[in-house]
Amino acid sequence: MSRPAAELEIVRAMSPDVIRHVWLNNKRHFAPDMSDELWLERAALRTSLDLGPGVEHKIWILVPKGRANDPSAVLSAAHTYDRAGLISDVIKTERKSDEVSVHLRDTIIVYVLLVFTPAEHRKRGYAKQLLVLLNDQLKRQTDPVVELSFLYSSIGQNFYESAGWSTIRSRELLIQVSSHRLPELSPSLPSQSTQGDAAAAVADNQGIMMEDITEFNVQRITDDDIELIRSEMRERALANANASPSLSLSQSQRVAVILPEGRLFQGQLAMARFTTGRVAMDDRPISRIGVQLISTGIVSARQQQPVFIIWTYLMPSKLLLILRVRYQTVHQLQCLLWEAMKEAHKWGITAVSLWDLDDIDAVAATGIPNTDRSGCWSCLCQLPQGTSSGGGVMTQALASVPLAAPVELVLNEAYIFGL
Ligand SMILES: CC(C)(COP(=O)(O)OP(=O)(O)OC[C@H]1O[C@@H](n2cnc3c(N)ncnc32)[C@H](O)[C@@H]1OP(=O)(O)O)[C@@H](O)C(=O)NCCC(=O)NCCS
């Protein structure tokens, strides 16, 4: 028998016994082969990482009211990280309705992971209730304000959609490292997605040098990247608004981005080192998390923009997951992917995965088409301020929440993987 919603509450787990209990429950499903000690050591490393001011790790539990410190009372649990995000809003000038300006807002996007119900409590609606109450709590939060929550589902779309999330369609380029050769390519081909200009392509001919991205220079590269993301979001929102001036504000689309963070990438490197050294017992050091291309030729202003790739090592799934890539020509993209393939090969990793690359660039650079991403769905939930489903009433209440202008897309969302 499930307990009535009114008897339950969601609280942040603070007791060490409860936290340990939740982690060990997670291990049973997410890492059944790892020893308890190693898993707890990994959990301690993960929670001790300094991931920056906007990135705090929290564990939430659904329990009967008043039993927050009792491990045996945990009915369902989830972890969250607060992530720095950016939303672009289009604003119409009051006097001239066809004039628009773009406003960029910093926001918090809460990333939800490791949703888990102990086996003996399953199929009683507890996970759904936990998720709904968590979103309710986030909606009420004022410092900082949270506008979106985000998660990856490995159990399909239905369950999370019934709890208020919508699924974001996403594409994946999967390169099998041992069997794939990149096509021969002329260095003068500009990319489709960035509309790389001819000058950039010519400059690309002048020669390029590589620099490893490590824990020491990733912050600088990421800071530059964020500046570019800001200006690109502004350009894109203006172009969208101008392309469809007849849309009302509530119809015009907002774009949300989870920002890359240097400290997060450093954290992912620390986790990969733990997995390699302690779990796989491979004592070779992982020294880099990507490469940056430096042009040595005559460069155009556009060419001076950073060209780089950042990856993370998903050792258990033998996958090198590309977290971030920035390029202007297909040749640059190819150089970057080639480095990623070499890195994967070095570690016995079988495939390189890159999400949401431009379709034309994917084929031009690799000869492989993107496919719809399956097995891992990105889900986004909008959390309009001042609305809540009122203490545990579930899907009907969520359905009646008036949504703000829809968020078109979350770009760059693979940042958290590997933690
Ligand atoms: C998924 C999970 C959290 C659901 O917990 P729960 O408290 O039983 O969930 P609820 O009772 O609120 O909802 C049950 C629904 O979950 C969904 N669900 C559960 N396991 C699922 C699976 N493996 N695949 C697809 N859907 C699943 C179903 O839609 C189910 O509905 P049904 O009863 O009509 O079949 C729980 O099964 C679990 O902990 N599994 C192991 C960890 C995991 O897979 N976490 C999710 C990672 S994205």
Image (spheres, grey):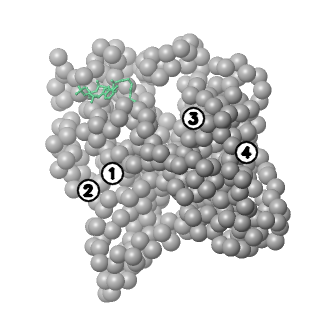
Task: First in sequence, mark 2 or 1: give its number.
Answer: 1
Measured in 3D between alpha carbons, the distance from the residue under mark 4 to the one under mark 1, in whole angstroms, is 37 Å
* Residue 314 in view, yes or no: yes
Image quadrant where residue 176 sits: top right
Q: Mark 4 highlights which residue?
A: 339
Near mark 3 (Cα within 10 A), the count class, few <14, some 14-19 or many ≥20, is many
Residue at figure coordinates x 38%, y 48% from the top left: 168
Q: Cβ–Cβ below 8 Å for labels 2 and 1?
A: yes
Q: Mark 2 highlights which residue?
A: 403
Question: Considering the numbered disc 2 on the image, is that residue within a helix, a strand or a loop?
Answer: loop
Question: Considering the numbered disc 3 on the image, is that residue within a helix, a strand or a loop?
Answer: loop
Task: Name the kind of residue labelled 1 in the image.
Answer: Gln
Q: Closer to the observer: label 3 or label 1?
A: 3
Instruction: Report the front residue among 383 and 287.
Output: 287
Q: What is the quadrant of the C terminus in the image?
A: top right
Question: Considering the numbered disc 1 on the image, is that residue within a helix, a strand or a loop?
Answer: strand
Q: Mark 3 highlights which residue?
A: 418
